[in-house]
Amino acid sequence: MTTSTPMIDYHVHLSDDLTLEDAVALAAERKMKFGIVEHPGPDFKIKTDDDLQDYMTTLRRFPVFVGVQPMHIHWAPLFSPDLIAQLDYVLMDADTIPLGEGQWLSIWRHDNFIEDMGAFMERYMQHIVHILTYEPIHIFARPTYLPINFARHYDELWTPERMHTIIDLARARNIALEIAENVRVPSMEFIKLAKAAGIKFTFGTNARNHNAGNLHYCLEMVEACGLTADDMFILPGE
Ligand SMILES: [Zn+2]
């Protein structure tokens, strides 16, 4: 017997438009649970172990899951492993690609001009492989997301070989794949392949406002790909 998918948005950011209290009320109103993520690292709010501890202590008083969303690879050594282990999960995407010498390419920015699609894909895949192989991660967010100027080439760029590379690495470390509401990735084809390989999924809106928990694409994919509770990510200990 299959049961319907648990309604959890694991990718919610707090902001002035969505305070912790707002998020808790909204989740209750939507009969959902939210996972809150904050960015750790020197350029972000959570810079030190004390910051991370305060963040967890504050959120633990509320019925939310507590996660972080590192933007940059190699963030973890900045924090004590014991503290990182107390988080419910680490969610990370591959949208901030290291270019060397402290430079990064943020592929979601609309003002990027990336000339060579082939060279880009090679670098992007290397970055994805690094994250899925070495970074501490439970949920791979925005999988297969492409810079806006390549988006129309999605089906041609995400070859079976590239899709299988991601799926095999995720499966090897039990990394769940996010179905990303706002950017509508990954594709139905990718989700079906991943499901067949035994991959687990999460829903994520990446919302910083009352769009949190607003799932359309995610539920469309549940329907189209026949996802059930068995296909969904379960937090260790849940
Ligand atoms: Zn995010």
Image (cartoon, rainbow, N blue to C red):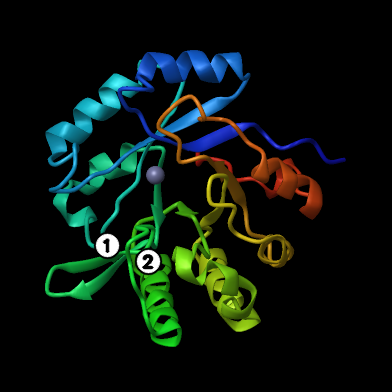
Q: Position of residue 27 (x, y in %)?
A: 54, 20
**Mark 1 to mark 2: distance in Å?**
7 Å
The residue under label 2 is 131
Mark 1 in CB contact with mark 2 (< 8 angstroms): yes
Of 142 and 140, the residue lying toward us: 142
Q: Is residue 20 above or below residue 105?
A: above
At x 42% / y 70%, what residue is drawn?
Answer: 128
- The label on residue 73 is 1
Q: Position of residue 47 (x, y in %)?
A: 14, 41
Packing grade of label 2 (10 A; few <14, some 14-19, many >=20) is many
At x 57% / y 65%, what residue is drawn?
Answer: 171
Q: Where is residue 174 in the image (x, y as percent from the top left)?
A: 53, 58
At x 75% / y 48%, what residue is drawn?
Answer: 227
Callout 1 amino acid: Ile
Asked which secondary structure carries label 2, the reply is helix
Q: Quadrant of the N terminus?
A: top right
At x 56% / y 30%, what residue is drawn?
Answer: 213
Q: Where is residue 13 in the image (x, y as percent from the top left)?
A: 38, 34
Asked which secondary structure carries label 1, the reply is loop
Callout 2 amino acid: Ile
Packing grade of label 1 (10 A; few <14, some 14-19, many >=20) is some
- The label on residue 230 is none
Tell me the quarter of the picture where residue 33 sits.
top right
Q: In this view, does 190 lie above or below 83?
A: below
Horizontal arrangement in the rendering, residue 40 relative to residue 127 (left or right): left
Tell me the quarter of the picture where residue 199 sits.
bottom right
Instruction: Looking at the image, tell me whether mark 1 or mark 2 is earlier in sequence order.
Output: 1
Of 124 and 211, the residue lying toward us: 211
Q: In this view, does 78 lie above or below 97?
A: above
Q: In this view, does 142 lie above or below 27?
A: below
Quadrant of the image where one finds ligand 1: top left
